Amino acid sequence: MTLILKTKRLILRPIKFEDYSDIHQLHSLAEVDEYNTLGIPENIDETIHHVKNLVNSNQGEQPQAYTFVIENDNHFTGLISLNLGKPKYKNAEIWFKIHPNFWNKGIATEALREIISFGFNTLSLHRIEAGCAVDNIGSYKVLEKVGMIREAHTRQLLPLKSGWADNYGYAILSTD
C-alpha cells in the first residue's frame, strides 16, 4: 500500500515493518495501555509479530485494513487504522493510539477526520464505527468532536488490565 494521506499538520502513511521500534515504545507506555486491550508487550518479539500482522492486513488488492503511522514534523506520533468489515455491509471500524507527548494537541481529531473522509470518499463506505472504554474521556471526546454518534453502552466488554470495562459504541454514516 503506497497510499499517503495528508492534513494541514500530519502525514498518515502506511505502517511498515521498520516502524516496530516506535510502535514497541508506544505500546510499552502505561498511560497508553490503560484503556488498551492489547496489553503491554512482554518483549520486542511480541511487538514484531504484531507489526507483521498489521502490515500483512494492509496488503493485497482488497486489504483487510488500512493501518497508518501518524507523523507530525517527521516525528512518530501514533497509529490509526480503518479495519474493513464484510464488503456487502460497506462498513469499517476505526481505532487510534497517540503518543502521550502529543495528547491534547488536536492530533487525534485531525487524523480521525482524515481517515473518516478517506473511508467515505475513497472507499465508498456507508458506516464507520468505533468503541472506547467509558472512562476513556479523551477518546470519546475526540470521537464526538468528529461527528460520531454514541449508539451503545455495552457492559463489561473490554478486558483491561484494571478488569472488565464497559464500552461506548460510536458510529458515523456517510450521510451524516
Image (cartoon, rainbow, N blue to C red):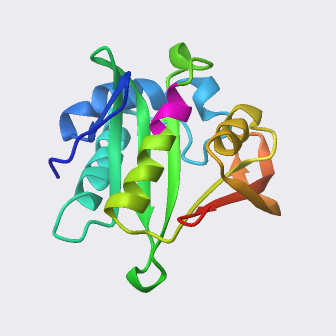
* Left or right of 154 in this view: 21: left
| Residue at horizontal 53 percent and vertical 65 percent from the top | 174
Examine the structure image and report whether residue 108 is included in the region drawn in magenta.
yes
Quarter assignment of residue 18? top left
Q: Quadrant of residue 162?
A: top right
- Is 36 above or below relative to 75? below
Q: Main secondary structure of the magenta part?
A: helix
- Name the image quarter holding residue 171: bottom right
**What is the x, y in percent for residue 96?**
51, 41
Q: Which residue is drawn at 44% across and 69% down?
A: 125
> Does 78 appear in magenta?
no
Q: Which of 7 and 53 is in front in this view?
A: 7
Q: Which range of residues does the magenta coloring cover?
A: 107-111
Tell me where residue 85 appears, x and y as whole percent. 45, 73
The vertical placement of 126 against 164, above or below, is below
Q: Position of residue 89 (x, y in %)?
A: 48, 81
Q: Position of residue 127 (x, y in %)?
A: 54, 68
Residue occupying the point 77% across, 35% down: 137
| Near-viewer residue (19 or 5) | 5
Rendered-image quadrant of the C terminus: bottom right
Judged left or right of residue 24, residue 97 is: right
